Amino acid sequence: MNTSPIAQLIQKIIKQGWMGKSFLLLITLLAVWRLVVALQENPILFLQQVVNGLQLGFVYALIALGYTMVYGIVRLINFAHGDVFMVGAFVSFYSITRFQLHTWAERLFPAMPDGVSLIIGALTVMAASMVACALLAVVIERIAYKPLRNAPRISALITAIGVSFFLEYFAALNFVFSPNFITYRRPIEVVTWAIGPGGITTLGGGIAPPPGTILISNIALIIILTSIILMFGLQFIVQKTRIGKAMRSVAYDKQTARLMGINTDAIISTTFAIGAALAGAAGMLYAIAFSQIFFWMGIIPGLKSFVAAVLGGIGSIPGAFIGALIMGQAEVISAAYISTPLRDAIAFSILIIVLLVRPTGIFGEPEREKA
Amino acid sequence: MSKRLLVVFSFLIVASMLLGACGPAGSAGGDTIKVAILAPLSGPVPTFGVSTRDGILMAIEEWNAKGGVLGKQIEAIVADSQCTADPAVNAANKVIDQDQVHYIIGEVCSSASIPVSEIAEQKGVVQISPTSTNPSVTLNPDGSTKNYIFRACFIDPFQGLVMAKFALSQGKQTAFIMFDQGNDYVLGLAEAFEASFTAGGGTIVGKEAYTGQDTDFSAILTKVADSQADVLFIPDYYNVVNLVATQAKERGVTSTLMGGDGWDSSDLDLAAADGGFFSNHYSAEDTRPVVQEFVSRYEAKYGSKPDALATLGYDAANLLLAAIEKAGEDDPAKVKDALASLQYDAVSGTITFDEFHNPIKAAAIMQVKDGKVIFADSIAP
């Protein structure tokens, strides 16, 4: 037994968590100071980086929703979710290149204005990858997770990792998708607008943007709009429909829900399907944004979205959304003002900090004691 | 099963060769000159191996058609070295000890060429690697040059130097460098570019590192656009270049993109990289007669345009055979001296060797233009 006063003081500090708290405070102050300096130095550049971060954050949000919904209902961290996202990207790629799905409206109704037929076509492609991912997720749930529903939680978790590896290496086979990097042909032309005090100009032809403007591309707008629409749709399903009500009751208490006559298995399958459909849409949006796909593309975005879901409070839909936006900003801002190689380290240290300070996340509620 | 049969079969072949060598008719040396080809015909990069082998075999056939070297026909012994240290060492030991070769052309990969070079150096066998770019292929750990080891390709830092020279010759004053901090190839090119560009009077206005897994380059590219650099130097492989080039357009980057031979792929996104330049070992569109003759003969023989690997294989074989002719004797000790002082008009440029047995030759500068890769310039160091 060591009872010297210094040792006691150290023990007290450790016990009360002062060290962690003061360390966090220091880091937060440093970050805030860095941001203020950056904002003063070149506010336009800073705003541009924020816009960059938004585009990334909205894609993460769509993936994070799948994590959070599945966790909310079956308390399973579905590590295969990132790979479902990858499948979504590939399905949209093949429906564009193999089946020309994005031009069907134009071929069927040549009289239709170009813009309208393109929008219909792009929406069809997105619907195709959403449906494909939803079906895939239902199959995965039936084969891999359902038999383990009453097994210890760690078994399902490890199975999820197994499913993730299976999807990756199955997709890498030559007769499935491909082990190569594939350049994604966007169905739409990229247009970038420079928005500034002097009005809006369209970029092109290698002309530098006018100084003092913020650039935003139609790709970014499409991503942000689609994500917002899908998120409102999801919120509507969960809050206003019968099936949403059933989902919430299953999430609240599975046994009681079953006693009340709810088909819990069907509800769980539906939850997986909806989450995967969002990941499928995210896969297409991500591929449009970065125009390159390959079979490992789901790992890193999947992990980051998982962090986003935890940050927002896993199980909470608005939480996943806010968490993902914070992740997007953290990543781009740290790449811009601290160090690009450190961006992932910073993104993942956010996870650690959240777990230390507020294990339930921003919108999370403490775990209820179940009878 | 068939693998075992193959092993038995190869044993039989080796045994019959040994018996043949023991017989009075095939006295040592004989009336042919044996040249071993170590190429990765299986393993991770079999297409590299096939191209290299085809290029070497074509050179040997041409020499044989002209009557061989020193009046003797050349006999090629092909061994599969799999781009990996162990199989490459086994293949090298086999061709040196059993087939009694004095000359090895290969390997393609640095990771296989380095262990082979140690055996070749020890046993006094001349080795010339067509494509291994790692400096240690021709250098001992203490920095001295291996006596018997040469290469036909330029090493990585050389490409950075050439691109810097080219950028300055185009009137570019400022450059921004993006590099993968975990990739030695990229680092080598980036450092050489920075050193040569500043030495030539240019300014590096920014330098940003990223990691190999990154897909979102928006933060860096926004800085590039803000810096308004004349050149964005991105010496990475085509998959990263595709990502960067696509996003650069959306971020208002007007800099000219430049890079190294990592861009050389049919999967390079030509629309995104339009207007960019990269260095390469040779161009099929080079108008020098030696290039045009080689390209047309290769196409007639194999039905496709020769890639850089076939070209460097062809050059390596020609360099070696020309050196044997110059030495006037089938003696590796003399051939290595002849090779070190050789000047040869090869397809990938007029080659002489420096003190480290690396070739001094011009690099081809390629431009991505209107959906095609075209020959832009030839830059000598």
Image (tube, coloured by chain):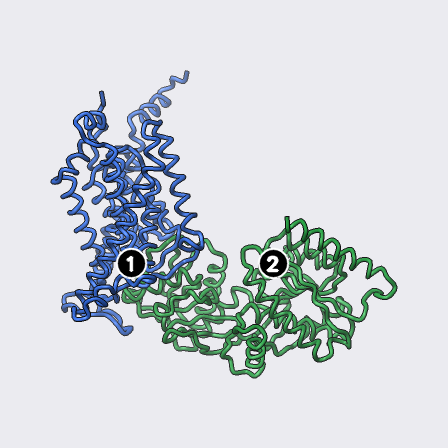
Residue situated in front as seen by the camera: B294 or A49: B294
Task: Tell me which amino acid carries mark 1.
Answer: Ala
- Mark 1 closeness class: few <14, some 14–19, many ≥20 residues within 10 Å: many
What's the mark number on residue A289?
1
What's the mark number on residue B136?
2
Dividing the image into 4 quarters, which one contains the C terminus of chain A? top left
Among all residues in the image, which is located at the extreme front? A108
Q: Secondary structure at mark 2?
A: helix
Task: Tell me which amino acid carries mark 2.
Answer: Ser
Task: Identify the chain drawn in green.
Answer: B
Residue situated in front as seen by the camera: B31 or B117: B31
State the image coordinates of residue B244 (x, y, percent, origin top left): 35, 62
Q: Secondary structure at mark 1?
A: helix
Q: Chain of mark 1?
A: A
Please name the residue shown 34% across and 50% down the image: A86
Q: Is residue A324 above or below residue B55?
A: above
State the image coordinates of residue A100 (x, y, percent, origin top left): 29, 63
